[in-house]
């Protein structure tokens, strides 16, 4: 009979598959399965992904716990398996070694709580037993798998079910559809939240309708990016629109959203749409000058394939592609999360369109870090900007289409800026 209360193995898994080491859903599943293989009773799992790299997590089992921290960039996982009773921790070790595709590993085993060194307390444990009996085991284990969108100083975490509906490394980025508890299914590109079922309307209504109502007669619209389809869905609600061209660089985004986010990707079959899976930056460069009434740049953050969507040359090309009177709207980042990109984009637009022709609209997206986000405008020619002229028309449109964010008051109101934002973009 063992003279120790617990058995603890501390494991170094080395030269593991780096993709697995950065995949919070796969690691959570493997850790839970490892516990089950070793015949543990799983109570709870809590896992976090850290952007850009690394996963930490714990599986609480009736017999104690399994814990992990990974460094994908080194293909390394530090794992510990602590067990009590008859459970064999080495079964979990074998299972994880295979799952993580570890090419090398080492482990040390420690007996924990040597009863020869411990003094058993002399107290009446019947009340403790009573308390233990009051605890209701839910009968199934609960999962806490967290998706975190962060920079080095702040983060937004969403708890998701652990289920992954789509996971594909395209030539441009990692495209995933995960399911969050609070916001439903969500599209993540390279670990950044792009859109979710439950709050997508904040973004898609606000990128499109203020500009569509600001322009006297928008007929020809260009959307760059926007692969989930939410922006074209909103633009195509406007009956005066004759043609929408959408240029999305990554076909995997469109494929994933058509299959898993059909309410967002609802308008890909519209006959007014010309869909091009192509590079939007090159498209703007080659566009015939004076073609579009409205250009909407629905790009992701300025890292990876969207970096060029924040450049002077790209916005100069967009300016040229607009008709004499036209409106550009760009995904403008957050004045609280990415001040530098926010300010630089506004200065670029001021330089190209004119100092008083680059207004900023603020809106709120609960699933983006800090929640406060922006669209930045470039107004070409006689376009007047956020001046309310169409209140009745807007309100009819809002109620006809059941819009849930945009309305007549926000048409102007979203352009009212807090002082710190005004300060940030002052030249
Ligand atoms: N950090 C999120 C930036 C948002 C980028 N675009 C979202 C796509 C929605 N159509």
Image: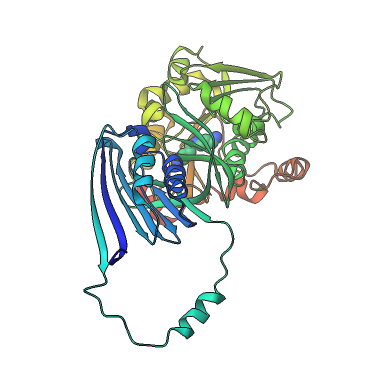
- Residue 386, visible in the rendered structure: no
- Residue 408, visible in the rendered structure: yes
- Measured from the top left, where is residue 182 in percent x and y? 58, 52
> How many marks are shown on the rendered structure?
0
Q: Quadrant of residue 264?
A: top right
Which colour style is shown?
Answer: rainbow
- In which quadrant of the rendered image does the N terminus lie? bottom left
Up the image or down, 119 lies above or below 1; here it is: below
Is residue 213 or residue 17 the one in the foreground?
Answer: 17
Q: Is residue 252 left or right of residue 342?
A: right
Is residue 246 or residue 19 the one in the foreground?
Answer: 19
- Measured from the top left, where is residue 68 in percent x and y? 34, 49
Residue at figure coordinates x 26%, y 64% from the top left = 112
Up the image or down, 138 lies above or below 223; here it is: below
Residue at figure coordinates x 57%, y 29% from the top left = 256
Q: Quadrant of residue 6?
A: bottom left
Taking the view exactly as shown, the residue that stands out farthest to the front is 1
Q: Is residue 138 left or right of residue 33?
A: right
Up the image or down, 63 lies above or below 282; here it is: below
- Measured from the top left, where is residue 174 in percent x and y? 43, 30
Q: Is residue 52 left or right of residue 246?
A: left
Q: Is residue 126 left or right of residue 115?
A: right
Taking the view exactly as shown, the residue that stands out farthest to the bottom is 123
- Measured from the top left, where is residue 176 in percent x and y? 50, 34
Is residue 227 or residue 189 the one in the foreground?
Answer: 189
- In which quadrant of the rendered image does the C terminus lie? top left
């Amino acid at each position: 009979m063992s003279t120790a209360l617990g058995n603890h193995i501390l494991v170094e898994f080395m030269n593991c598959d780096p993709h697995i080491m950065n995949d919070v859903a796969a690691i959570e599943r493997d850790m839970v399965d490892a516990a089950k293989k070793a015949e543990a009773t799983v109570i709870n799992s809590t896992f976090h992904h850290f952007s850009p790299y690394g996963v930490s997590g714990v599986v609480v089992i009736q017999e104690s716990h399994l814990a992990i921290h990974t460094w994908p960039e080194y293909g390394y996982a530090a794992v510990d398996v602590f067990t009590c009773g008859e459970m064999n921790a080495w079964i979990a070790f074998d299972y994880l070694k295979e799952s993580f595709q570890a090419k090398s590993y080492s482990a040390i085993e420690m007996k924990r709580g040597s009863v020869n060194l411990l003094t058993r307390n002399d107290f009446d444990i019947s009340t403790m037993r009573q308390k233990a009996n009051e605890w209701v085991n839910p009968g199934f284990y609960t999962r806490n798998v967290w998706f975190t969108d962060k920079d080095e100083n702040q983060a937004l975490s969403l708890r998701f079910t652990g289920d992954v509906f789509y996971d594909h490394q395209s030539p441009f980025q990692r495209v995933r559809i995960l399911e969050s508890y609070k916001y439903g299914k969500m599209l993540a590109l390279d670990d950044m939240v792009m859109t979710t079922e439950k709050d997508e309307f904040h973004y898609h209504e606000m990128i499109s309708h203020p500009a569509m109502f600001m322009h006297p007669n928008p007929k020809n619209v260009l959307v760059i990016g926007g692969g989930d389809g939410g922006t074209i869905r909103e633009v195509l609600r406007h009956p005066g629109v004759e043609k929408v061209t959408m240029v999305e660089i990554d076909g995997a985004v469109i494929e994933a959203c058509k299959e898993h986010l059909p309410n967002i990707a609802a308008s890909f079959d519209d006959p007014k749409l010309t869909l091009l899976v192509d590079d939007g930056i090159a498209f703007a460069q080659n566009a015939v000058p004076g073609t579009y009434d409205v250009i909407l740049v629905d790009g992701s953050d300025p890292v990876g394939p969207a970096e060029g969507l924040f450049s002077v040359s790209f916005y100069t090309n967009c300016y040229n592609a607009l008709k004499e009177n036209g409106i550009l709207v760009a995904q403008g980042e957050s004045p609280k999360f990415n001040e530098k990109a926010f300010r630089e984009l506004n200065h670029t637009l001021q330089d190209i369109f004119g100092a008083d022709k680059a207004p900023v609209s603020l809106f709120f997206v609960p699933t983006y870090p800090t929640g406060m986000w922006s669209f930045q405008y470039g107004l070409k020619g006689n376009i007047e900007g956020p001046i309310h002229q169409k209140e009745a028309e807007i309100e009819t449109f809002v109620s006809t289409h059941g819009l849930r964010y945009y309305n007549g008051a926000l048409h102007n109101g979203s352009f009212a800026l807090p002082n710190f934002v005004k300060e940030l973009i002052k030249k």
